[in-house]
Image: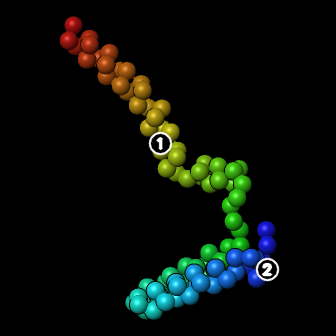
Amino acid sequence: MTLLKDSEDADKLRLVHSEIWTKLQDQDDLYAKTFLDNCLKSCEKKRVKYTISETIKDYIKSPIIWISILIEVLIVPVFSLAFIGISLILE
């Protein structure tokens, strides 16, 4: 992985940077400041997730994945019991 200053795409990225700057000049001051602060924070992280194991670890730490697994595990017995209960009532 090469640094940006040594990259072949540095000129293309400079054009993207100037386009972003041009579009930010048409925005509200607070929006531009927030956008640039968020960009700086993401640059300061200096850690890019490229491996599958790191991506999987992030999914496992997410509460949404655990909620969806819990719902999937509970939905089958609930529907089975409801089906059996309704069929017993109708008989």
How far across and how far down the image is residue 60, in percent? 60, 48
Instruction: Examine the image and state in which quarter residue 28 appears.
Output: bottom left
Residue 6's disc number: 2
Q: Is residue 36 above or below residue 77?
A: below
Q: Residues within 10 Å of mark 1 (few under 14, many from 20)?
A: few
Image quarter in which the N terminus is found:
bottom right
Give the foreground label among 1 and 2.
Answer: 2
- Marks 1 and 2, the one that precedes in the sequence: 2
Identify which residue is drawn at 47% across, 42% down: 68
How far across and how far down the image is residue 15, in percent? 59, 84
Looking at the image, residue 1 sits to the left or right of residue 34; the answer is right
Q: Amino acid at mark 1?
A: Ser
89 or 79: nearer the viewer: 79
Which residue was labeled with disc 1? 68
Q: Amino acid at mark 2?
A: Asp
How far across and how far down the image is residue 88, in percent? 26, 11
